[in-house]
Image (spheres, helix red, strand yellow):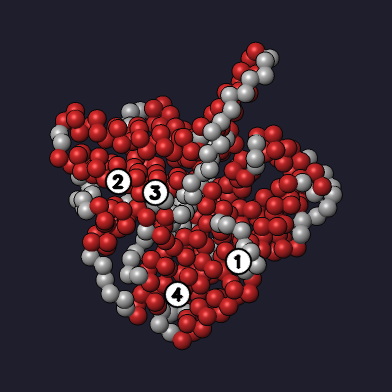
Amino acid sequence: MPGLLGLILVNHQLANAISVRAGLARRRLLISAVVLDLAVLGLFKYLDWLLGSSSSVIRWLTGRHVDLGGLGLILPLSISFVTFTILAYVIDVYRGRAPERRLSSVALFITFFPHLVAGPIVRAGELLPQVRHPRPFRTLYLAEAAPQLAGGLLKKALADQLAPAVGLALAHPGQLSSGALAVALVAYTFQLYLDFSGYTDLALGSARLMGFRLPRNFDWPYRSTSMSEFWGRWHMTLSRWLRDYVFFPLGGTRMGERRTTINIMATMMLCGLWHGAGLTYIVWGALQGGALAVHRWWRRRPGRLVMPVLVAWIITFSFVVLVRIFFVSPDLASAFRYLREMFSLQGGIGAEPILVAAVIVGIVGQWPALEGLARRALPPGSGRRWFAVGATFAAGLALLPTGAPDFIYFAF
């Protein structure tokens, strides 16, 4: 915590200096802040990985065993989310989009506990005005927060119910049939969504109880019919952050198709590296960037074939599921082993019933018609809605295992 407060204080001073300087001096201050924040992130999250990777490369090139060691620093909780929030604040000051300068308000904005640990990544313009003008408690806040809190609790409980079976399949792919491995990977895709969006719902609901509104982070991402649409629905605050603070500064789409493709790839590989220090994350990010670039090329192609919605959804969802293996595997060898076993069409032990049920319910639950039906059946303020909220809370508490594991995105 002292380190976090020190980082906030330094960035606050740099932001204040940026706001009163002009020209080259102003730009140098911005660069200093960005370098400082990225250096802190790199020190804790990537230095040991870089040293270990360098040792492996030297050993491969020379045949000599070289151990560059490492600092063995403990990764601070949520350092990635905190760093991105601070960077966004300083850059917004540079762009004239964050007028608030009081240290107390800025510190509260950055350390506001609902979004501090795992997002959503909040912009200065979204939260600072609310910090400056707090509102007294109103019963409306409870009415809006209760469904989010209940839904978030139930999502987390369901994710934790899936975790043991999914973890067993991922750890021992050679013991399961190809079909079971495919079911387990789809189940992990839903587990990740339930876990992360569950935390987001709890964060939004907690903030709403205190009169604050945080930005939405998920919009039914598994309904997407293209990867561009998927990244407009999944972890939306991260997508916006990467677009505004990485993709656009690199040139966006303004410098020709080849440069646009390079910018997309660089942005998504950075997205992968942000999630973790390892080649698996970089490969995952490169695959995401490649899919976005291909979709952009296809969409701009004259006379292109317009796919039926169902076909486009199947292709998109299948790609999302397949590349998840690089997100969850400890190394590339494990990821390729899992894929090899899954596509080998081998027999073996089948999938556990809980995974099969999760896949069926998860896919069916994406249908937009069900969302519309729920809205009509449970209008805001109705007794039926409050009964549903209470039942959801009770179900979440009943399903939540003792000693539940951390949220998956706490690691980032």
Image height check: is 207 above or below 338? below
Q: Which residue is mark 1?
A: 157
Residue contact between numbered discs 3 and 2, judged by CB atoms under 8 Å: no
Disc 3 secondary structure class = helix
Q: Which residue is mark 3?
A: 2
Spatial separation of the CA atoms under disc 4 and disc 2: 35 Å
Percent of width and height locating residue 318: 61, 47
Q: Earlier in the sequence, mark 3 or mark 1?
A: 3
Query: Which residue extends farthest top?
Result: 62
Disc 2 secondary structure class = helix
Is 178 left or right of 61, judged from the image as shown?
A: right
Spatial separation of the CA atoms under disc 4 and disc 1: 17 Å
Q: Give the number of the disc on residue 45.
A: none
Q: Nearer the viewer, mark 1 or mark 2?
A: 2
Percent of width and height locating residue 289: 49, 36
Query: Label 3 is placed on what type of residue?
Result: Pro
Disc 4 secondary structure class = helix
Q: Which residue is mark 4?
A: 146
Is 210 left or right of 350, judged from the image as shown?
A: left
Residue at 30 percent of width and 32 percent of height: 32
Tell which of 250 and 132 is nearer to you: 132
Query: Label 1 is placed on what type of residue?
Result: Ala
Image height check: is 72 above or below 98? above
Spatial separation of the CA atoms under disc 3 and disc 1: 33 Å
Q: Which residue is mark 2?
A: 9
Tell which of 283 and 44 is nearer to you: 44
Q: Earlier in the sequence, mark 1 or mark 2?
A: 2
Query: Label 4 is placed on what type of residue?
Result: Ala
Q: Earlier in the sequence, mark 4 or mark 1?
A: 4
Report whether residue 198 is seen: yes
